[in-house]
Image (spheres, coloured by chain):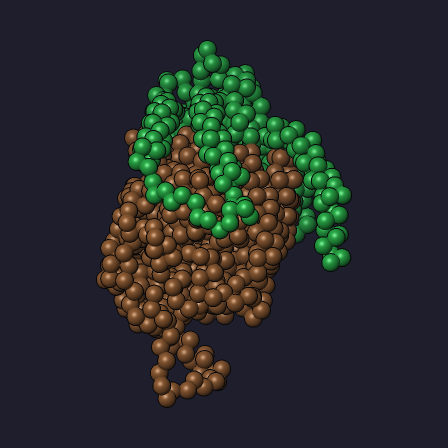
Amino acid sequence: MIRRTIFADLVTGRKLTLLACLFVATVATAEPANFLSSPTNIFAPVSTPAKSILHLSLFVLVITGIIFAVVFTLLAYAVIKFRGRSGDGGREPAQVYGSTQIELAWTVIPVLIVVVLYLATARVIHAVQDAPQPANAVEVTVIGHQYWWEFRYPKLGIVTANELHVPVSDPAHPTPTFLNLLSADTDHSFWVPKLAGKTDLIPNHPNRMWIDPQRTGIFLGQCAQYCGVQHAKMLLRVSVDSPEDFAAWVRAQQQPAVQDASVAAGKRVFETTACINCHAIAGTNANGRFGPDLTHLMSRATIASGAAQNTPQNLRVWIQNPNAIKPGSLMPAMQLSDADLDAMVSYMETLR
Amino acid sequence: MASNAITIPGVQIEEKLWLDTLHGWLTTVDHKRLGILYILSSLVFLVFGGVEALIIRIQLMHSHNDFVSPQVFNRMFTMHGTTMIFFVAMPILFGFANYLVPLMIGARDMAFPRLNAFSFWLSFLGAVLLYFSFLGGNGLYGAGSAPDVGWWAYAPLTARAFSPGHSSDYWTLAVMISGFGTIGTAINIIATILCMRCPGMKLSRMPLLAWLNLVMSGMVLITITPLSAAQIMLLIDRYLGGHFFDAQAGGSAVLWMHFFWIFGHPEVYVLIIPCFAFMSEIIPVFSRKPIFGYPVMVAATVCIAFVSMSVWAHHMFTVGMNSYANSFFTITTMAVGVPTGIKIFNWLGTMWGGRIQFKVPMLFSIAFLFQFLLAGLTGIMLACAPFDWQLSLSYFVVAHFHYVIVGGILFALFAAFYYWYPKMTGRMLSERLGKWHFWLFLIGFHLTFDLMHIPGVLGMPRRIYTYEPGRGWDTLNLLITIGTFIQAIAILVFVANLIISYFKGDKAGNDPWDAWTLEWSISSPPPAYNFASIPVVASRRPLWDLKHPEDPDSRYE
């Protein structure tokens, strides 16, 4: 009896209401700012494919919203209006078995809605998927690896990893980037929500997608298709550069690695350990292809496919024990002496 | 109706030893006992799958959490998905079908009682085998490792190069063996419905529950077989040097996807159609009206079954099919929404003009209608291929299919539990605990799965064991986790209700809901032989005819 009173108090004493209001208020004030500023919001596109998808989505949302409003109203009305009352005296309501006209109506109307939705969708499918590749398009081959991204620019002779650089595209004179998607091992998926929908990277099944970002800046994304232990930390950064910045970046990437005599000791450690089995540095004897190309490692803001900032301290931790940053990463712990490790990190820091 | 009990003179019923009782249950071929075994084993695995879900949610509570390692997390979501689909949803629905179909068509048992028992124990073996992987997954070393390739087990992640040890083999064999059991039961249900109906029960007079289970069983025969075939091919790849899915040797990873989803999508309908069946029995009884548009309900179900066979590749809009294929699967997927919409409207039509009684089964049914409507609408969004390029593989999809599976299937199952528990045990489930269960579960469900759509829109992919801060995902994930725990508490209330009511519930009597189908004409629980004399029916609602001789349904059919 007492428990029931307390419960009733809670409800009638407005404590519950107050709690509910507080909860809603917290969410409402704290979150929307967060939502809008989310760097991976699909409703804040800056590139044509993502924009076409947004426009279609809004159309679909409006139509489904109307369907929801109509059916929900009918359901709510039925529940309230036709609830059994104590005064019914146990009599049964009129037994109705069906109505051909009504059933025909709620078959034909949905069919028409489907036709409209389909036509709108087919247009966007065609526009995004079958867009011709213009002659001035930048071409990049994206190769998914267990748990990092390899980017190759065949026409420019560049090989890099994890951070894709593309030129900004002026809507008046578009310079889109076309991505050829391959995989070296399992399935992956390239997803940078503000630039385009995702497309999978599947071994022995080349795919293609394109972006034409119309604003400079860094755009984030990550692998969307489960690819193994470290699927979560296979992050993506796309740097959209002004034409000048992009040209400068291309020139820098085309250079061989910096040769600096002051870090020869570190270079020697690198060249005489297992590093070179997997990593390449242009201009040295390291030409492994299993891991990311390190020729211009310092031009990248992150290491371990975005799992950590590219700082000397993080590099040290990463080389010594990759599992500390990314458990399940395929890079083995190098187990170097402190002196060798220091030398190696110093050498890495010169690879601009 | 004839009297239900046969008294055999000179035979006295003696108190049985518990060992005899156990032996009786383990060797039973009675469809009612097998139905209950199906349901009980599914409830156990529901708890396992639920605990896995809680572990997943604790890990995702905030960014960079380290409650479990990535390896453990990957096993958890693989086991959660596999358990819930193959060892909870399928068998529990088969359990209800097993129990109810013979009773509702006036039969004394299923067509093949021994096949029935064999199928149940095969499926159960599959479940046990899957969980044995926690001990034996690494083979000889005695170290455990449950499957961690996701419940789709996409190639080539399942190749030996990427999945050494035996965890993937446990997944393959467990699911394949339970699939054989599933096929056995499906054949049994079809044969029972086609051959064992009581006199007067034409196909057009069959309760919708029987109709829908007939359609579902037909779909099982078509959909489980490609999965079994693909699993055999996978074992050939892994052990006999085959290259079906081995992309490095010219095999095709996309081939596995097609095989998996031509099973996987119709599977959704295999699960939801029996739930439509529950709704089609429960909503009329608690609205006090016959089902609105019976022939259209049957036609819509058959239509769903056919169309749903041609929609599978909407799970593959991101794998790089050409624009014609993407358009084709967009239109077929949207088209399947039409017969599904007809069903929702017909249930509304059933409620319209009725006298709705808000007993617990009806509360769950109304929530089902609301949630299934929303799940259908997010389904339309995902059917739209370009929208899907953004939403696919994200938490939006996770929210969408949990809306179908929890908001739809599980709510319908709860309705079925509250509705038929009295028939199975002879006791009513407590309405008071039932309402606590309903409201807690409803709040937990909506807190979890309504909010879960948003991280998907904000770019959060599924199957990640951790995520970066600053993406607007943290607060949402915390709230989602809180919702999961509210659902867990509701499940505890439900289990408590099942146990307490079994001993202390009110006596149910033959027909506690004043219902109209044949199972309510006999005692609760029914005797082993079901019907002392086989009933004869003249309409879709034989008990209505009996209770209203002045205005029988048979006059209108």
Left or right: A283 with respect to B294? right
Residue under the point 56% across and 71% down: B503
Relative vertical location of residue B464 with respect to residue B3 in this rendering, above or below = above
Q: Nearer the viewer, residue A181 or B396?
A: B396
- Outermost residue toward the top? A172
Q: Is residue A211 visible?
A: no
Q: Position of residue A213 (x, y in %)?
A: 50, 21
**What chain is colored brown?**
B
Relative vertical location of residue B426 with respect to residue B399 in this rendering, above or below = below
Residue under the point 49% across and 51% down: A90
Relative vertical location of residue B430 with respect to residue B394 in this rendering, above or below = below
Residue under the point 42% across and 56% down: B515
Q: Position of residue B326 (x, y in %)?
A: 33, 33
Q: Position of residue A102 (x, y in %)?
A: 35, 33
Residue A120 appears in which quarter of the rendering?
A: top left
Q: Nearer the viewer, residue A257 or B277?
A: B277
**What chain is colored green?**
A
Relative vertical location of residue A15 with respect to residue B147 in this rendering, above or below = above
Quarter occupied by the N terminus of chain B: bottom left
Residue B330 appears in which quarter of the rendering?
A: top left
Left or right: B195 with respect to B407? left
Left or right: A271 with respect to B9? right
Q: Is residue A18 visible?
A: yes
Residue under the point 28% across and 47% down: B556
